[in-house]
Amino acid sequence: MARAIVLRQLTNSPKSRFQLSQKLAERHIPEDVAEAVLDRFVEVKLIDDAEFAMLWVRSRSMYKSLSRSALQRELAEKGIAEDVAQEALEQIDPDTERDQAKELVRRKLKGSLDLSERSERDKYTRRWVAMLARKGFSPSLAFAIVAEVIDESFLDD
């Protein structure tokens, strides 16, 4: 029964050992049975937290434009060891991370926004900084990125 649960979970999407352990506990599988099944799956490389972390970071960074800190938090929630998480996060280039954040703001800036008035510029700055903060960027970096993109837009005009 435990083996079937784990296989079904892995069929849907990659999972960490911790996530699978939680799923087995939810289904009232005895802990010793769950550990034995999970150990076997690790042994045959059907469960690999390092590979899971690498895939998770690549996917969430590319498609959700999340910062390193947000990704680190997500990996911790999924039970990934800190050293494994750090190794996975090393694949993110800080310049690429910053460029993704700038591109997010640029996409929001496109259109017919008139930021020549101070009140409008401040309103959108707050919105975009909040958006970047939700993606895990520090407030100081978010403000710097938004200011840089707004300045670029005025230079382009």
Image (spheres, grey):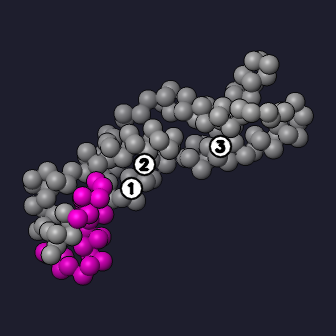
Q: How many marks?
A: 3
Q: Which mark is residue 136?
A: none
Position of residue 96 measured from the top left corner of the image (x, y, whole percent): 49, 28
> Where does the N terminus fall, quadrant-wise?
bottom left
Check whether the beta carbons of the residues at disc 3 and disc 1 lie within 8 A of each other: no
The answer to which image quadrant residue 55 occupies is top left
Q: Secondary structure under badge 3?
A: helix
* Rendered residue at 40%/42% (across/down): 59
Magenta region: which residues? 8-33
- Look at mark 2 in the image and give the residue it sits on: 72
Residue 108 in sight from this viewpoint: yes
Residue 105: x and y, percent? 65, 35
What's the residue type where badge 2 is placed? Gln
Give the mark, 3 or 2, whose residue is nearer the N terminus.
2
Q: Amino acid at mark 3?
A: Pro
Task: Please rate how many residues cluster around mark 2, counting C-alpha atoms within 10 Å: few if below 14, some from 14 to 19, many from 20.
Answer: many
Residue in the image at 18% along x and 80% along y: 30
Q: Are marks 3 and 2 in contact (CB under 8 Å)?
A: no
The residue at which mark 3 appears reads as 139
Using residue 77 as the reference point, say whether residue 102 is left or right of it: right
User: What amino acid is labelled 1 in the image?
Assistant: Ala
